[in-house]
């Protein structure tokens, strides 16, 4: 019945929005605790591999509880491979950036990904690049220039490139997953994507000899909070995409850099200059402008 269909759709949207809010808070607190883990002796690749191990366990439990089939149709077999490799890169790039530059700066650069979602959606023919979104991209670019001014003065281009590159990966996975996944196959696709990310992360960790766990209590606290916060958040975010779409999810992503910056100031005592604060404000404004859908007229 049409009424039931509308109710089901509204319920899915509410659940999707709640999942993205949960993801925003988890992603927001994760990098500051990752920094504590590094100070305690951990290495980024070890933390990435541990995160995806937890993701696989959680997704397996979700599939079991929901009695969801974990089979992926033949035409979508490519997606878990691409998604898994990109997920591994996203986490590695961002966590490595956090080690190289301030958490607040890495977060501001990484969370340009909602703007990049608009660009990828346009390039793939899924969304139009409106005047407002072009203006948002321009504003966001100015914000990025302001934010990285501190990083450039410290000559740490490596961390800046990692943060922006990781954001690019998240944008691409968001667009791909929101288009290919639906409410019926999202759990299976996410489970196998996490398996690929987990195996690839552990392989690279041992090949590069980058396995290192914390050796202090504070380091372990940071490691565990960052690991669990990320694992729950990444699952919540990607399961929400088929419910509300990549563009709407990007609106809620406005919360993430704000939370990340506040946590960095609270936990790590990071302080930013006026130029960097202005840049972060411009990026958040640009993301909101670029993520909103145009108002629909009556009829």
Image (tube, grey):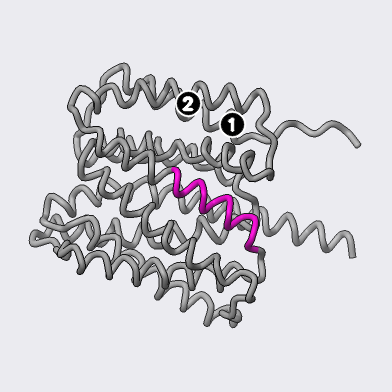
Is 172 one of the magenta-colored residues? yes
Say which residue appears at 68% left-offset and 40% top-offset.
127
Q: Which mark is residue 140?
A: 2
Residue 115 image offset from top left, x and y in percent: 53, 35
Of the pair 272 and 197, the residue shown nearer to us? 197
Q: Quadrant of the C terminus?
A: top right
Instruction: From this view, report whether residue 166 is shown above or below residue 10.
Output: above
Say which residue appears at 52% left-offset and 22% top-offset.
138
The span shown in magenta is 168-181
Of the pair 139 and 208, the residue shown nearer to us? 208
115 horizontally vs 278: left or right: right
Which residue does the numbered mark 1 point to in the structure image? 290
1 horizontally vs 47: left or right: right
Residue 1 image offset from top left, x and y in percent: 89, 65
23 horizontally vs 43: left or right: right
33 horizontally vs 25: left or right: left
């Amino acid at each position: 019945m049409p009424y039931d269909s509308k109710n089901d759709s509204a319920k899915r949207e509410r659940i999707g929005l709640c999942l993205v809010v949960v993801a925003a808070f988890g992603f927001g607190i994760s990098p500051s605790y990752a920094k504590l883990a590094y100070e305690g002796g951990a290495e980024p690749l070890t933390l990435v591999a541990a995160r995806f191990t937890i993701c696989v366990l959680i997704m397996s439990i979700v599939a079991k509880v929901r009695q969801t089939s974990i089979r992926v149709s033949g035409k979508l077999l490519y997606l878990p491979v691409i998604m898994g490799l990109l997920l591994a890169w996203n986490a590695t790039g961002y966590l490595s950036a956090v080690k190289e530059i301030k958490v607040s700066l890495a977060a501001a650069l990484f969370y340009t990904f909602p703007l990049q979602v608009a660009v990828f959606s346009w390039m793939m023919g899924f969304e139009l690049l409106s005047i407002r979104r072009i203006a948002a991209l321009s504003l966001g670019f100015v914000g990025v220039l302001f934010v990285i001014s501190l990083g450039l003065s410290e000559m740490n281009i490596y961390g800046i490139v990692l943060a922006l590159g990781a954001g690019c990966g998240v944008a691409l996975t968001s667009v791909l997953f929101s288009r290919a996944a639906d409410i019926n196959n999202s759990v299976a696709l996410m489970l196998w994507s996490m398996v690929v990310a987990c195996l690839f992360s552990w392989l690279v960790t041992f090949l590069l000899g980058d396995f290192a766990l914390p050796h202090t209590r504070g380091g372990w606290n940071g490691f565990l909070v960052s690991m669990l916060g990320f694992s729950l958040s990444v699952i919540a975010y990607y399961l929400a995409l088929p419910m509300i779409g990549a563009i709407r999810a990007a609106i809620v992503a406005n919360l993430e850099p704000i939370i990340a910056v506040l946590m960095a100031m609270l936990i790590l005592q990071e302080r930013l200059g006026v130029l960097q604060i202005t840049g972060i404000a411009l990026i958040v404004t640009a993301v909101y402008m670029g993520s909103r859908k145009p108002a629909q007229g009556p009829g």
